[in-house]
Amino acid sequence: MKLQVIVGSTRPGRITLRIAKWVVASAEEMPDVEVELVDLADYNMPFLDEAISPRYNPNRTPNPEAKRWLDKLAQADAFVIVTPEYNRSYSAVLKNAIDYVDFQMERKPVALVGHGATGGAQAIAHLRGVLPGIHAATVPAATFIMRATDIFDEEGHLSEEAKANPYGPHTALKQTLDSTRWYSDALATARAKA
């Protein structure tokens, strides 16, 4: 499985990057998984600048930065979006990146890892409503992280205290990643038959 972990924030000093590094390290422990960190900060896309919805434009020519983003997404079998919660939703930069997508995530699983005052619950809920618009399949299991600044260091290592908690984020993430693997295998088989 080729898995991309998408950093859903571009803010300076973002906690989201720490968590994404942790997700990458955790996924790399799984057998037969190729993991890549995809940081939205590396894609300087303008606000969606296309006159026709990307899915319905047969003559589409996205701007070069958006094309680079779309080409990257097309390489993956599955995704984990790591999202902060800003004002009870996910970030504007993440919404803009999703709006550029036409078919790169279609019939592929997208797992969600959120953080914030309520563990990113509202950001995750909003993404569950948006991702079907690009025909992505959201993984039912998700990971909700509270007090992220207290439990992750700059390199994305989980604190020993958090690791000692059997109900901590590492347990939730394992379930999320295992579920993502299952959906990736099932959807790859179905796509091959289509």
Image (cartoon, grey):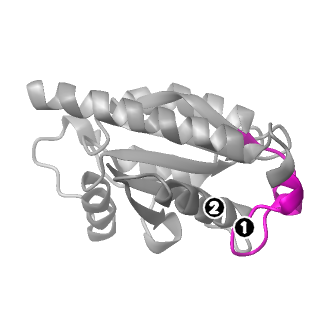
On whether residue 151 falls in the magenta region, the answer is yes
Residue underneath mark 1: 157
Up the image or down, 3 lies above or below 158; here it is above
Three-letter code, disc 1? His
Q: Tell me which corner region of the image, top left, top right, bottom left or bottom right, holds residue 45.
A: bottom left
Secondary structure state at the residue bearing disc 2: helix
Secondary structure state at the residue bearing disc 1: loop
Instruction: Determine crowd level at label 2: few under 14, some 14-19, many 20+ residues with C-alpha closer than 10 A.
Output: many
Q: Residue at x 46, y 52 (%)?
A: 30
Q: Residue at x 49, y 32 (%)?
A: 179
Three-letter code, disc 2? Trp
Q: Residue at x 50, y 57 (%)?
A: 29
Left or right: where does residue 116 sit relative to residue 111?
right
Left or right: where does residue 113 sit relative to residue 138?
right
Q: Nearer the viewer, residue 136 or 184?
A: 184
On whether residue 29 falls in the magenta region, the answer is no
User: Which residues are the magenta region?
Assistant: 144-162
Q: Nearer the viewer, residue 82 or 133?
A: 82
Specify whether residue 107 is in view.
no
Up the image or down, 130 lies above or below 66; here it is above
CA gap, disc 1 and disc 2: 6 Å
Q: Earlier in the sequence, mark 1 or mark 2?
A: 2
Q: Position of residue 186 (x, y in %)?
A: 29, 27
Residue underneath mark 2: 22
Q: Position of residue 121 (x, y in %)?
A: 73, 33
Specify whether residue 115 is in view.
yes
Query: Are circles 1 and 2 on residues that touch, CB within 8 Å?
Result: yes
Q: Residue at x 80, y 37 (%)?
A: 167
